[in-house]
Amino acid sequence: MTTKPPVIWLNVAIFSLSFILAAVVTPWFGWHFGFGAEHWVWLIVCFSFCNLSITMGYHRLWSHKTFEAHWLVRLLCALGGAFALQNSALHWSSDHRVHHKFVDQNDKDPYSAKKGFWYSHIGWMLRHYNQAVYDDYSNCRDLQKDKIVMWQHRYYVPLAVLMNIGVPLLLGVIYNDIIGMLLMVGAVRLVLNHHTTFFINSLAHIWGSQPYTNKNTARDNGVLAFFTFGEGYHNYHHIFENDYRNGIYWWQYDPTKWLIKACSWVGLTKKLRKAPPLKIEKARAQMALVYVQSRILSLPNHVVLMNSFQNEFDAFMSELHNYYDIKRQLLESKKNLAFKKYERSMLKVRYEQVKLDFVEKRNRWNRIVSQYA
Ligand SMILES: [Zn+2]
Ligand SMILES: [Zn+2]
């Protein structure tokens, strides 16, 4: 029998105490003394500030370098991250980079979903499972050059105390209800912050669809995206981790993406990275192929169906490549001044034709795939 690593009592105390305060003491307090609109408003404001600091700062900026940010944005994310009480940005990013590199490998992924819901959600933080590499930040040398990251890492404990006790206390003094604010903005907010983020490691690797890859357990889940400021599109994220977006379609709820984009309009963020559309469409089509093939297999005429389906896929792929190829040529011609005007207009005409063919093939492909949905 293998003995389990020692318990991290500080984490156990923080998680259980905040949970009891939020789930038992707060309702009791509210029943007896009531909460005003100010409690709810500040709960939402602080919850959003903390969660966005994690999604925009810890995750998409520092862990994945999907954009560059002004020092003011980095400072706010460092403060909000300490408020969210999820360790320093350096530590969080280091763990997260290992998670992506070795996803689902039980011996390496710090919160491997293959070890079950409880372990990936919170269990991994309750014992010294990763003690051997706890202070190893060699996979974050780039972040060690960021003065704000290092400042937050160095003063993480006082910053965390200042934010978690100081902010609710200040609000309590302003609104003349110290206990009420400590409960709502302190405990309830913290528990919500913790578990919505933890759901990405647990539920987003269990519940949802796999439109882009089935090589790992990550799932796309619109419900989770709603509670996690867009991080629920985790299947996409695990294959295109360098994209600043997680929900790539305009209708997908990804407020973190909108915030990063909006900040770029006023110069607070720049160099926003996106995955190439060709790669995205290819991954999607390949997964659809895998999915439909598995559905066809049980049908009596599966050999014939399989062949015709493969042909449709190949035709779509070749049209896909044609389209992105000519699109690239057209873009290059716009940058190249030596390009003759009539040559460019010829290219434009060809582009429009290829685009029509491509859209038609894509619609046809989507229709066929949807028959097997
Ligand atoms: Zn990630
Ligand atoms: Zn993940």
Image: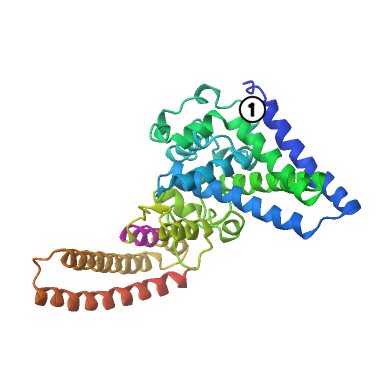
Q: Is residue 91 above or below residue 268?
A: above
Q: Quadrant of residue 131?
A: top right
**Hey, what amino acid is under mark 1?**
Arg
Foreground residue among 214 and 324: 324
Foreground residue among 262 and 23: 262
Question: Is any part of residue 99 visible from this angle?
Answer: yes
Q: Position of residue 20 (x, y in %)?
A: 79, 41
Say which residue appears at 64% left-offset and 27% top-offset: 127
Q: Is residue 231 left or right of residue 347?
A: right
**In the displayed image of the protein, which residue is found farthest to the front?**
174
Say which residue appears at 8% left-offset and 66% top-offset: 338
Say which residue appears at 50% left-offset and 46% top-offset: 57
Foreground residue among 293 and 44: 44
Let me know if residue 279 is in the magenta part. yes
Q: Which residues are magenta?
A: 278-287
Let me know if residue 100 is in the magenta part. no
Q: Name the dominant secondary structure of the magenta segment.
A: helix
Q: Position of residue 347 (x, y in %)?
A: 15, 74
Q: Is residue 47 above or below residue 160?
A: below
Give the residue number, with chain letter if any, for mark 1.
Answer: 127
Q: Quadrant of residue 232?
A: bottom right
